Image (spheres, rainbow, N blue to C red):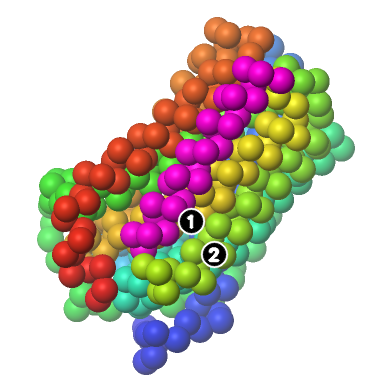
Amino acid sequence: MTLSKHPEKPAGSFLFILVLISMGGALASNIILPSLSSYQLAFETDYARAQLTLTVYLAALALGQLIYGPLSDRFGRRPLVLAGLVILFLGSLICFLATSIEMIIFGRFIQATGACAGMVMGRAMVRDRYSQERAASLLAYLTMIVLVAPSLAPMLGGILEDLAGWRASFLFIQIFAALVLCISFFGAKETLPVHKRQQAHFSKLFLSFPFLLKNRVFLAFSLQVSFNTAAYFSFLGGASYVLIDLMGRTATELGFYFMMVIAFYCLGNFVAARLTQKFGISRLIKAGMLIALSGPVVMLITELTIGLTPVLFFSQMCLVAIGNGLCIVPGVSRAISADPDRVGAASGLVGSMQIGFGAIGTFVVGLLLSVFETTALPLIFVVLFCCGAAIVSSRMSARHTVTNPLENP
C-alpha cells in the first residue's frame, strides 16, 4: 500500500476520503433530532425514552472507539474503515424497519458501532502522516468540512420528517453508507505501514489505555475536550424539547436553528485552522474555553430576566459553538500526540471519552427536563457545568505542558 512521499502536503483525494469516512457518525447522530417528538407519538412513549435513541447512540460511539483505536494500531486503518461502513448500513436498515422504540434503540446501537470507525480512523490517519502542529491545522480544516454536511442534517431530518415521516432519515443514512463504502473500497489507502504496527496479542493492545490515562498531558486535554463536547451534546439532547414542546415551534425550524449553531462551530474550526501555527495550540484552547463559557452564562441571565426566545436561545448557544470550534480540535491534537507510540489507541480513547461524556450529558438533560417540564433551566445549568469543568480540567497539566517537547515538534 502506498504512502505519501510528501507527508506535509495534504493530497486532495486523501482529504476527500477522510471527509467521507469521518462524517457518517455526526450525520447519523444529528439527522434524527427533529424526530424525537415523533417517536413519542408513534410508539406512545415519553421524551426521556425517545431521547434514548440519541443517548444509546452516543454511548455506542464511546464504546466502539475504545475497540477500533487499538485494533487499528495492530491491523491498520483501512480494514476497519470498510467494516465500519458495512455495520453502519445494517444498523440503519434495522432502524428503518423498526416497529417499536426498543427496536430503534437497538438499531441505533448497531448504527453507532459502525459509524465510530470512520471517526477514529480519520483522526489517526491524519496523525499518521503529519506532525502535531500540522495535524492540528489539518484536523481543524477536516472537522470544519466534515461538519458542513452534518450541519444540514437536522434541517434535512426536519424536512424529511415533515414530508415523509421519521423512517425517511434512516433510509437516507443507508444510501450514504452504501455510497461511501464503494468510494472507500477503491480509494482509501493504508496510512500505517506494517513496520509501525503493534504486534502484541489482541488482549494486550488494550493495555495502552492505562498508560495513556497515567499521562498527565493526555488526561488533561482529553478531559478538556470531553467536557466541551458534553456541553454541545447536552444542548443537542434538550434543544428539541425546549423549542418544540416548550416554545411550540416545528421540526423544520429546529433544523434551521441547528444549522446556525453548527455554522458557528465551523467558523471556530476555520479560525483555529488559520491561527494554530501562528499562535500555538495552548492560546487557542484558552481563548476557546472562555468564549464557550460565556454562552451559558449569558443564556442563564437572559432566562432569569427577560426570558428566552428561539432566536436568543440558539444565538447564545452560538458562543459555545464558536468557542468549541477554537478549543476542541487543538485539544484533540494535543491528546493524541501525548504518546507517539499509541496514536490509534489515543485517538480511540479521547473520542470515546468525548462521546461518553456527551452521552451522559444528554441523559442527564433528558432526565431533568422530564422532571422540570416547564423550563429550560436544567439544560442551561448542565451546559454551564460542562464549560466550567473543561477549564478546570485543562489546568491539570499546566505545569507539564509549558516544557512539553510535543508543543513544538
Is 206 or 201 nearer to us in this picture?
Answer: 206
- Going by the image, does 233 lie left or right of 399? right
Residue at image location 77% in from the left, 38% down from the top: 158
Is 287 or 186 nearer to us in this picture?
Answer: 287
Residue corresponding to mark 1: 326
Magenta stretch: dominant SS? helix
Q: Secondary structure under badge 2? A: helix
Q: Amino acid at mark 2?
A: Val
Are discs 2 and 1 less than 8 Å apart at CB? yes
Residue 363, compared with residue 111, is above or below; it is: above
Residue at image location 18% in from the left, 64% down from the top: 404
Percent across and percent down for residue 396 are: 21, 44
Q: Secondary structure under badge 1? A: helix
Residue corresponding to mark 2: 271
Residue at image location 35% in from the left, 77% down from the top: 130
> Which quadrant of the figure contains the N terminus?
bottom left
Please say whether residue 291 is one of the residues in the magenta stretch: yes
> Which quadrant of the figure contains the C terminus?
bottom left
Residue 242, compared with residue 171, is above or below; it is: above
- Going by the image, does 338 lie left or right of 249? left
Give the magenta-colored segment's residue range: 281-306
The reply to whether residue 273 is in sight is yes
Residue 137, compared with residue 51, is above or below; it is: below
Q: Amino acid at mark 1?
A: Leu
The reply to whether residue 65 is in sight is no
